[in-house]
Image (cartoon, rainbow, N blue to C red):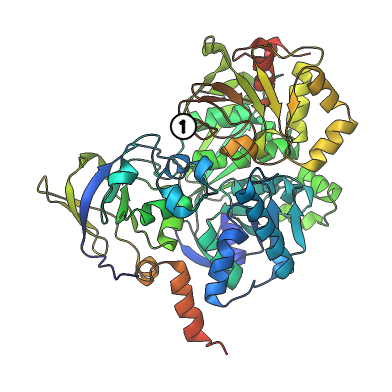
Amino acid sequence: MTAYTLAEKILLRASGAASVRADDIVIAKVDLAMMHDSGGPRRVAPYLERLGATVWDPDKVVLVTDHYVPAVDPQSAAILSLTRRWAHENSIKRFHDMQGICHIVLQENAYLRPGMLVVGGDSHSPSGGAVGAFMVGIGATEMAGVLVTGEIWLRVPATISVEWTGALGAGVCAKDIMLALCRDLGQNNDYKAIEYSGSAIRAMPMAERFVLCNMSAELGAKAGMIAPDGTTLAEIRANGGIVDESALEWRSDPDATFERAVSFDASTLAPQVAAPHSPGNTRAVKSIGRVRIDQAYIGACTGAKLTDLHMAARVLSGKKVASSVRLLVAPASTRTTQIAAADGTLATLTAAGAILLPTGCGACAGYGAGVLGEGEVCISSTARNFKGRMGDPSSQVYLGSPFTVAASAVAGYVADPRDFLN
Amino acid sequence: MNAVNLEDLRGRAWVFGDNIDTDLLAPGHAMRKPLEELSRHCLEAIDPKFARTVQRGDFIVAGEGFGIGSSREQAAQALAYLGVGAVLARSPARIFYRNAINLGLPVVRFPDARLVKSGDTLAVDLVNGRVQNLTQGTEHAVEPVPAFLRDILLAGGLIPHLHARLHTLKPRA
């Protein structure tokens, strides 16, 4: 019997092919299509109209408003009202209006299961692989094609196996792993699936595993994936999903062929920071020197989940943000805000001087509140620090974990969180 | 849609380096603007004169990771709107590649991209996988565009391609 990787197994099932191997092109049936207000209805609706076609299966569509929320001008308000109207007219039941960032909404509503083939109209779609699904990012025209046909052509990716053995130290987290990988594996792993394994990964809660798959986009990967285990099934069930133990069979066969296998020791990893203007421009925080900051930003799908706010609170408890710094926090979902309010996290953050912003993609993509002015320096828990992405082309963005962002906010310069942990 | 001859595209080269990302191609601050206005900001952070002076049929020649980052297809759409004839990159980023083809903008892997200088005149054959540098008098191989993607390009993109498919297979009442 042929041995398959997890990615190959899912594409084998979804395509109905007799066999698949890396580099084959398959036409696959899509189990779920997710889109948001930026790449969604405002761009796909005219295409559907032109084709005289309707959505192939409205129950397999998830629509989220997160990029232009809350509206800041008449143009963004118009995009949002168009999105709402389209959801209604097309009977999209899984429409989540201003409830959170799309990738978080998918997890919170248990829409994803091991073994599913999912397309997302957003480049951080590899996030969905955290549950053992194959989720791939596509653009709006391609989404229109999926909405009409329920199918997509895909090249079966070769898989790179990335193992993290040992255990992460205090003040070090999944974000540090990904910043280190952006440097060590580079950002041009195009058309590859990355599968994460090892004791450090198994020990992670789903929200941390999510970060690994989420930032696989920064490695240039097509998909990031983690084989499901007890933690995966427990999370799906806690979010109201129904899944049985057979889902654990969605894993790479022991003798599957990987293009490459690399292994790292988590116990030696120190907090990392990526300097402008690339997520791969990474070094240990300790070796960056004194980088003064104007803004610290905790936001986006990558860095403002409940676990991320908890990390920030562990650093900020009983401390104050430096007077020269503004610390902005935009929780990744309304549920995150709700729980963080109930468990005292928001009180800790705001007592330290954090300013709460609305839930949404916000300043990460330069759309919402918190963008940067000329020459300003920011440390951010987000995933990308491309030139000009968060504001003025002359602004400088450093990427770090929520621990590191919080520590830097207190210090006034990029700082190692291990010196600030409570 | 004007017919393109994928065997003989001609234009001048605009040479860029590695990892030209989607935020450079379609800046966030312009994303809610109409395409015409958005396109004026294409690559402004690294080459303010590009959007003003690029000519119809010109080529983008770039290094690794061209179009990395966001899935926003305005990155490809802005280039197409400005008249770019094709993108020739050592490694085009995956989503950008699909978006561009779906919008009718040819993209190919071009291993020798570094040998081209800005302003060189190129003749590109995407069917047989050949780039002639008419300025330098050299010839280079590129990965030919697969036949089923050429069909999408020749139709003018995925939507016209689907239109033809849907309305041929099952004519609507």
Q: Quadrant of residue A197?
A: top right
The number of discs equals 1
Q: Position of residue A43 (x, y in %)?
A: 56, 60
Tag 1's secondary structure? loop
Residue labelled with disc 1: A387
Q: Residue at x 56, y 29 (%)?
A: A179
Q: Name the residue at the right extreme.
A: A342
Q: Residue furthest left?
A: B137
Residue A214 lies in quadrant: top right
Examine the rendering and report whether any part of residue A16 can be seen.
no
**Label 1 chain ID:** A
Disc 1 packing (10 Å; few <14; some 14–19; many ≥20): many
Q: Is residue B126 visible?
A: yes
Q: Residue furthest bottom?
A: B173
**Residue type for callout 1:** Lys
For this view, does A415 lie left or right of residue B71? right
Taking the spot 74% from the left edge, 69% from the top edge, the residue there is A91
Where is residue A84? Give x, y as percent: 71, 59
In the foreground, A33 or B1: B1
Residue A55 image position (x, y, % from top left): 64, 71
Q: Is residue B106 above or below residue A237?
A: below
Q: Residue at x 83, y 21 (%)?
A: A348
In the drawing, does residue B167 fall left or right of residue A55? left
Above-or-below relation of A84 to A18: above
Write the residue at 54% across / 34% down: A384
Q: Kindly indicate the quadrant of the structure image that contains residue A335.
A: top right
Between A135 and A148, the one lying in front of the other is: A148
